[in-house]
Image (cartoon, rainbow, N blue to C red):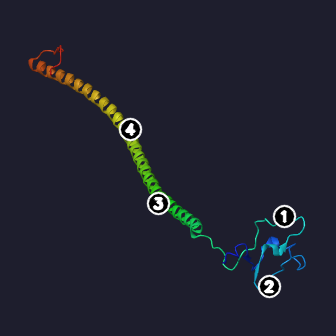
């Protein structure tokens, strides 16, 4: 652009807030008039309606829409970077959660197996204890019965010894021809 054209802007489309109330100055209001030999307009070529917010020092000026300003790449990359980072973090956490679920399931299965084997062992031990208690009671009753039989056999043995001793004394007395006397103690 020339140094003379610093304050001028090329108008392709006016800003939206200029769509109402602006009109070109009439040629009799202006000393110079509009230079039709150029497609450049100056700020003085438009007048603002009375009471409008726009005045000659207003910052709203027409802009050249032929080469719109493109946003810088850095600001548009940040959301993508954050989205990708979030996706990677979510995927990683999901994978870790699934892995922990698998290992937890395996540990739970091991614990259930251990509990079942302990319960079987307890049941087996309890049935063995019941069997031992029954066998013990049976043996006690057999022991009592056998003890009674032994006592009866001892008594029978003593009676037989006494009878045998009496027979022996009678036999000796008959050979000698006298009446037998009872022995003081049985012979063993």
Q: Which mark is residue 53?
A: 1
Report the disc number at residue 36.
Answer: 2
Measured in 3D between alpha carbons, the distance from the residue under mark 1 to the one under mark 2, in whole angstroms, is 28 Å
Q: Looking at the image, is mark 3 or mark 4 earlier in the sequence?
A: 3
Q: Earlier in the sequence, mark 1 or mark 2?
A: 2
Q: Nearer the viewer, mark 3 or mark 1?
A: 1
Q: Which mark is residue 133?
A: 4
* Tag in front: 1 or 2: 2
Query: From mark 1 to mark 4, how far is it between C-alphas?
Result: 109 Å
Check the picture and name the quadrant holding the C terminus. top left
Query: Disc 3 to disc 4, how far (Cα)?
Result: 50 Å
Residue 45 lies left or right of residue 70; in this view the side is right
Q: Is residue 142 above or below residue 87?
A: above
Nearer the N terminus, badge 1 or badge 4?
1
In the rendered image, residue 29, in percent from the top left (x then y), is placed at: 89, 76
Quadrant housing residue 134: top left
User: Is 185 located above or below residue 43 in the figure?
Assistant: above
Is the residue under label 1 in contact with that under label 3 (CB below 8 Å)? no
Do residues under tags 1 and 4 come within 8 Å of each other at their CB atoms?
no
The residue nearer to you, when weighing 87 against 145, is 87
Q: Disc 3 designates what residue?
A: 99
| Of the two numbered discs 3 and 2 in the rendering, the one whose residue sits closer to the viewer | 2
Residue 24 point in image, percent of width and height: 86, 77
Distance of mark 3 from mark 1, alpha carbons? 65 Å
Tell me if label 4 and label 2 are in contact, CB under 8 Å. Answer: no
Nearer the viewer's eye, disc 4 or disc 2? 2
Q: Find numbered disc 4 in the image and state the secondary structure of the residue it sits on.
A: helix
> How would you rate the neighbour count of disc 3 (Cα within 10 Å): few for under 14, some for 14-19, many for 20 or more?
few
Q: Earlier in the sequence, mark 4 or mark 2?
A: 2
């Amino acid at each position: 652009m020339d140094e003379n054209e610093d304050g001028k802007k090329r108008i392709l489309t006016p800003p939206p807030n200029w769509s109402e109330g602006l009109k070109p100055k009439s040629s009799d209001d202006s000393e110079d008039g509009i230079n039709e030999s150029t497609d450049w307009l100056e700020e003085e070529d438009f007048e603002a309606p009375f009471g409008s917010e726009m005045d000659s020092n207003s910052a709203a000026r027409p802009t050249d829409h032929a080469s719109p300003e493109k946003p810088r790449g850095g600001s548009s990359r940040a959301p993508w970077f954050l989205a990708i980072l979030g996706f990677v973090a979510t995927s990683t956490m999901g994978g870790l959660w699934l892995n922990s679920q698998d290992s937890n399931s395996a540990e739970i299965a091991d614990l259930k197996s251990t509990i079942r084997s302990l319960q079987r062992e307890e049941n087996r031990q309890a049935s063995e204890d019941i069997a031992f208690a029954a066998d013990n009671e049976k043996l006690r009753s057999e022991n009592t019965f056998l003890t009674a039989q032994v006592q009866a056999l001892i008594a029978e043995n003593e009676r037989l010894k006494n009878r045998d001793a009496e027979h022996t004394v009678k036999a000796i007395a008959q050979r000698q021809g006298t009446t037998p006397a009872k022995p003081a103690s049985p012979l063993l």
